[in-house]
């Protein structure tokens, strides 16, 4: 879909549809009030008769509105003005885009971007309108013989309004950011939604090479199992032994900053399918374990967005990728493996495999002399129990880094919640036979998983995002969300501004 930014009075817009907001109870927004005056109170008369209350999500599509050049006017309910916030703003944009797409407008000029959102400027509103519109129209039907999206006249052009010409340049920059983040999110969604028989570790490696072909300052290298054996990555390789698909360690290096500037490193868990190994998962909903590579998918998305925006930073994406399946050669409960760091690990549960592939990847990242490392993983069901489907779990060893990630999450609506990483939890990982166990019992599962990873991150500033609750949706709306690409990209934007 094509996006553009424009300033000007609504009645002068020659377009298929003008979109304005109505607050509850039956209160016109400022752009709607202006339109009402030039139409001889056509809108207010309709609302006074009870045609629309202004409740959040309500719509009223009008044709042949007098004294306008538009074919239609779409009124969108915004709820109570005093309660109008970030989340409700995204909802009204989503409602408008869905309605426009279903009613054959094909193009629209949207004045919802002039609504007042407390604490948010025009840049924020235009960027989030762009992201929300792209997210609303996303479909994954590439593997269907008949496509889902059979709309006869779909929305193709979305014009976002700003109140003055002085805001045009900043508005265009906001749309550019929004499109880059939306594109990265779409890439993460597409990878996440692919089935495990297509999206294998080899497939991910090929996608990384394709991404490098698209951007001149992005290079990719892939370590094979023989390379990992030379590096003594015993933890990662122990997971892949149960699969016929060879493991891959994918390294994407984006060079947008100064030559010797320390890079930001993103490490994404890339389990392209997780059956649990010998500690096999229940069969119900096991198909959703194709989403166990959503950490890796988010790294793809963030690297793509950073390259698209040509951010002036150095960025490295590292993806350890494997399957976790039961096999005669697979890990067994009680096995002890030696990680690349030299620490030995007693495997008490083969379904706690994500931390095994991540720990070797984290050790490998020491060679990059990183400024910070952020790992992203669908790591624990305990995180879903703790935080539900709304926030990622965040733990780390460097307060400024966790603070920056929390702020990036608040700005994007892709939020995280910090959890404690106290020494007291480390004792749960004690083993009688190895340096540590790979699980710490039922209590505080998200925290003990992060405690495990922290043993491999003592040489750098590190944060861990557990995205098990936010990476995909179940039920009728089943599918990858693309999170936390918006948060990660905003963190990179903020980081590049500091640099």
Image: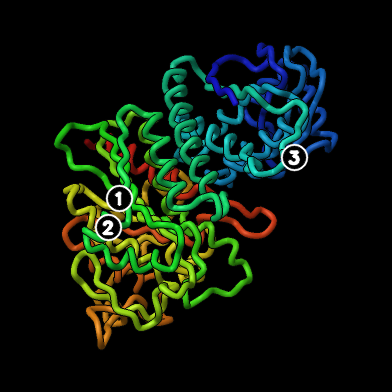
**Label placed on residue 223:** 1
Q: Which residue is painted at 29% across and 78% down in the image?
A: 336
Element under disc 3? loop
What residue would you read off at disc 3? 146
Rendered position, 238 above or below 317? below
Work out how far the residue at label 2 is from the one at label 1, CA to CA, in angstroms. 7 Å
Rendered position, 173 above or below 430? above
Rendered position, 311 above or below 301? above
| Along the line of sight, the residue nearer the viewer: 383 or 96 | 383
Question: Does 1 sit left or right of 260 as displayed?
Answer: right
| Along the line of sight, the residue nearer the viewer: 74 or 216 | 216
Q: Position of residue 39 (x, y in %)?
A: 76, 17
Work out how far the residue at label 3 is from the one at label 2, CA to CA, in angstroms. 42 Å
Front position among marks 3 and 2: 2
Q: Which residue is painted at 42% across and 24% down in the image?
A: 173
Q: Position of residue 202 (x, y in %)?
A: 43, 49
Q: Position of residue 247 (x, y in %)?
A: 38, 57
Q: Reading the chain from its start, which is encountered first: label 2 or label 1?
A: 1
Front position among marks 3 and 1: 1
Q: The N terminus is located in which quarter?
A: top right
Element under disc 1? strand
Q: Are marks 2 and 1 in contact (CB under 8 Å)?
A: yes
What residue would you read off at disc 2? 228
Q: Which residue is painted at 35% across and 69% down in the image?
A: 238
Element under disc 2? helix
Work out how far the residue at label 3 is from the one at label 1, CA to CA, in angstroms. 38 Å
Q: Reading the chain from its start, which is encountered first: label 3 or label 1?
A: 3
């Amino acid at each position: 879909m094509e996006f553009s930014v424009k300033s000007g009075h609504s009645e002068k817009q020659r377009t298929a549809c003008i979109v304005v907001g109505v607050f509850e109870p039956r209160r016109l927004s400022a752009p709607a009030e202006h339109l009402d005056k030039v139409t001889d109170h056509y809108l207010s008369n309709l609302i006074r008769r009870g045609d629309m209350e202004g409740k959040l999500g309500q719509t009223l599509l009008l044709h042949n509105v007098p004294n306008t050049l538009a074919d239609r006017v779409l009124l969108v309910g915004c709820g109570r003005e005093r309660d109008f916030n970030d989340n409700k703003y995204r909802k009204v944009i989503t409602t408008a885009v869905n309605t426009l797409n279903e009613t054959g407008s094909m193009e629209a000029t949207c004045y919802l971007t002039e609504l007042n959102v407390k604490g948010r400027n025009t840049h924020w509103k235009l960027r989030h309108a762009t992201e929300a519109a792209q997210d609303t129209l996303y479909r994954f039907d590439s593997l269907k013989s008949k496509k889902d999206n059979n709309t006869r006249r779909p929305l193709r052009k979305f014009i976002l309004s700003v109140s003055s010409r002085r805001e045009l340049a900043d508005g265009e920059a906001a749309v550019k950011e929004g499109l880059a983040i939306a594109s990265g999110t779409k890439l993460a969604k597409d990878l996440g939604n692919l089935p495990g028989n297509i999206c294998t570790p080899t497939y991910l490696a090929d996608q990384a090479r394709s991404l490098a072909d698209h951007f001149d300052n992005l290079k990719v290298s892939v370590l094979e199992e023989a390379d990992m054996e030379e590096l003594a990555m015993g933890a990662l390789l122990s997971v892949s032994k149960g699969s016929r698909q060879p493991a891959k360690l994918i390294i994407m290096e984006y060079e947008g900053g100064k030559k010797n500037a320390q890079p930001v490193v993103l490490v994404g868990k890339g389990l392209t399918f997780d059956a649990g190994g010998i500690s096999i998962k229940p069969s119900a909903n096991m198909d959703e374990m194709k989403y166990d590579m959503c950490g890796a998918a988010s790294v793809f998305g963030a690297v793509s967005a950073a390259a698209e925006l040509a951010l002036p930073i150095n960025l490295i994406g590292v993806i350890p990728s494997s399957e976790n399946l039961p096999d005669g050669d697979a890990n067994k409960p009680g096995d002890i493996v030696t990680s690349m760091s030299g620490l030995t690990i007693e495997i008490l549960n083969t379904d706690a495999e994500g931390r095994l592939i991540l720990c070797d990847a984290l050790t490998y990242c020491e060679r990059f002399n990183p400024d910070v490392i952020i790992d992203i993983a669908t790591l624990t069901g305990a995180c879903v129990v703790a935080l539900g489907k709304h926030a990622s779990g965040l733990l780390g060893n460097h307060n400024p880094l966790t603070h920056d990630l929390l702020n990036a999450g608040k700005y994007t609506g892709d939020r995280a919640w910090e959890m404690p990483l106290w020494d007291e939890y480390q004792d749960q990982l004690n083993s009688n036979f190895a340096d540590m166990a790979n699980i710490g019992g039922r209590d505080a599962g998200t925290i003990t998983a992060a405690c495990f990873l922290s043993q491999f991150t003592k040489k750098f500033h590190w944060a861990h995002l557990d995205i098990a609750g936010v990476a995909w949706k179940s039920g009728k709306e089943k599918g990858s969300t693309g999170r936390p690409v918006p948060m990660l990209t905003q963190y990179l934007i903020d980081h590049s501004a500091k640099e």
